[in-house]
Amino acid sequence: MKALQLALLVCCLPDNSMAMPAQGESDSQTAAIQVINAPQDEAIAARFRAISAAIAGMETVEVSVQAGVLTLKGEVNTAQLKTAAADIANRLQGVVHVQNQLQEPVALRSRLAPAVDKFGEMLTNAVQMLPLLLLALLSIVLFWLAGSWLSQRGALLRRLGLSELATNLGMRFVRLIITSIGILIALEQLDATALVSAVLGVAGVIGIALGFAFRNIVENYLAGVLLSTRNPFAIGDFIQVDSMSGSVVRLTSRDTVLMTLDGNHLRIPNSQIITSPMTNFSRNPLRRFEFSVGVSVDLDLVVVRQLAIATLQQMTGILADPRPRVLVQELGDSTVTVRVLAWVDQRDTDFLKARSEAIRLVKAAFDKAGIEMPEPIYRIHMAEMPVAADHAAATPAATALTAIDVPASATSIAAVDVSADTTIEQQVQDDLQHSEEENLLPGGKAAAKTTKS
């Protein structure tokens, strides 16, 4: 009998295995709905009303709870408030399900209400901080005025030997630094030092972007500063950069303006002048011109040299020191090329006119003396041709050569000067002695002082 009662009692007990969660279930599984001691619906609604009353923008939300199902009705200003209300309702104990029936206002005025409230709050804060804003603005103005005043005092930089362009750049940099200090002090007064890091970061990014965008402009500007500091040329100097040449008109912060020989303005970027070989033909007033002449192989080259030199010495504008020279340049099949060189002083003689006149006079002198300037000649030697014929063919050239009236000493070997030409070296030393421009080459100043003493 007792065994039968025990069996009936076991059968009547509830199966707790169905109510207990399995050990392998995930922690994120939805919590079970309470049946015993479930929170009352009115308590849930009262709790939500208390929370929504404390949040701005949710005061008018209507809430109703029935059997643990919470329903939200009404209007909220933004979608964020709608989502926040649903999130709060889901977190309340005893809520089984949330029906979010909140709506956002469609009227423009309702949508602008949060922005208007935010603007009013900012305006109130601005009025409270007005004294600090005025003090910060006064700091910026004072430092800007101080920077402007100092930027007009470039006499010190000029005493250091800086050019006008470099001085202006330095003064602008000083004004920028002083104004930046005033801005930093103003931000410190407004307790906005955190903004400084953001501003510097943005300025750095903008600076990198502008550096890549305006790289050529920056390069040309810095090159202009270097050119104005180094002074490699002056107004009116005739220079050549790569294949471009002309007289210097002006130097700007971006390019150098040249006047070409045909009267056109040529603009060369300053960065190209800095990085390219440049020849200044006007820095040294003495300049040498040259041209080549081809004469017959049958002539006495010593006589030809003496005639060309004597012609140039009689020409106006040709300097006697350094004296004209004639050098044998090349021996061809039918001609001998001689190179004629002479010096002029560019301060009172035009280079191109002097060279043109020298060519004309030498050509006239050679023609008058019977010196032949032949074209290429091809000779054909015949085996059957007698030797006397060759001798007879050479006689006219010898007769023409004897017609040249030159001193007898000109044909002697002792009259030929093959000594080293130190004309350029002497002019370099003279420039080192008289020029005040700094020479960064080793021994440049010392060599000049030694030669002068």
Image: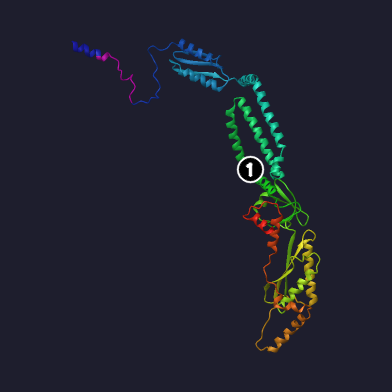
Front-most of residues 218 and 224: 224
What's drawn in magenta, residue-wise?
A: 10-23
What's the residue type where badge 1 is placed? Answer: Ala
Place of residue 445 in the rendered image (x, y in percent of width and height, measured from the top left): 66, 54
Q: Is residue 279 visible?
A: no
Q: Residue at x 63, y 55 (%)?
A: 443
Front-most of residues 429 and 327: 429
Q: Quadrant of residue 416?
A: bottom right
Place of residue 423 in the rendered image (x, y in percent of width and height, measured from the top left): 70, 64
Q: Is residue 276 above or below residue 38?
A: below
Place of residue 430 in the rendered image (x, y in percent of width and height, measured from the top left): 71, 58
Q: Residue at x 64, y 22 (%)?
A: 132
Please state, as top left, top right, bottom left or bottom right, where the N terminus lies in the image.
top left
Front-most of residues 436 and 99: 436
Q: Is residue 66 above or below residue 171?
A: above
Front-most of residues 213 and 326: 326
Q: Is residue 80 above or below residue 351?
A: above
Q: How is the image coloured?
A: rainbow
Q: Quadrant of residue 404?
A: bottom right
Dot 1 falls on a residue whose secondary structure is helix
Q: Residue at x 71, y 88 (%)?
A: 389
Please state, as top left, top right, bottom left or bottom right, where the C terminus lies in the image.
bottom right
Chief secondary structure of the magenta portion: loop
Provide the residue designation for mark 1.
Answer: 213
Q: Is residue 212 magenta?
A: no
Q: Residue at x 44, y 14 (%)?
A: 68
Q: Residues within 10 Å of mark 1 (few under 14, many from 20)?
A: few
